[in-house]
Image (spheres, grey):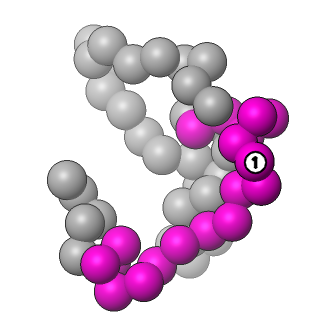
Amino acid sequence: MHGRELLQQGLFRHTGNGISSNVWVEKWIIDTIPRPPMYKANSVVNLALK
């Protein structure tokens, strides 16, 4: 739910069709520099998520 307010304001990034865009590797979060999302090392995430 973190960042929900930004999404509601219309923040988005085109990722194509999503077939080759890896959620946890691509630098799709725009900050001072583009960066990938962060996750906790002990959390369960699908690192192959497209």
Q: Quadrant of residue 15?
A: bottom right
The answer to whether residue 34 of the structure is visible from this angle is no
Which residue is under mark 1?
A: 17
Considering only vertical position in the picture, is 23 above or below 29? above
Which residue is painted at 75% across and 48% down in the image?
17
Which residue is painted at 31% across and 27% down in the image?
40
Residue 30 rendering spot, x and y as whole percentages:
56, 70
Amino acid marked by disc 1:
Asn
Foreground: 34 or 20?
A: 20
The boundaries of the magenta stretch are 6-23
Residue 8 rendering spot, x and y as whole percentages:
29, 78
Foreground: 25 or 15?
A: 15
Which residue is painted at 56% across and 25% down in the image?
49
Q: Is residue 37 left or right of residue 3?
A: right
Q: Is residue 44 left or right of residue 13?
A: left
Q: Quadrant of residue 14?
A: bottom right
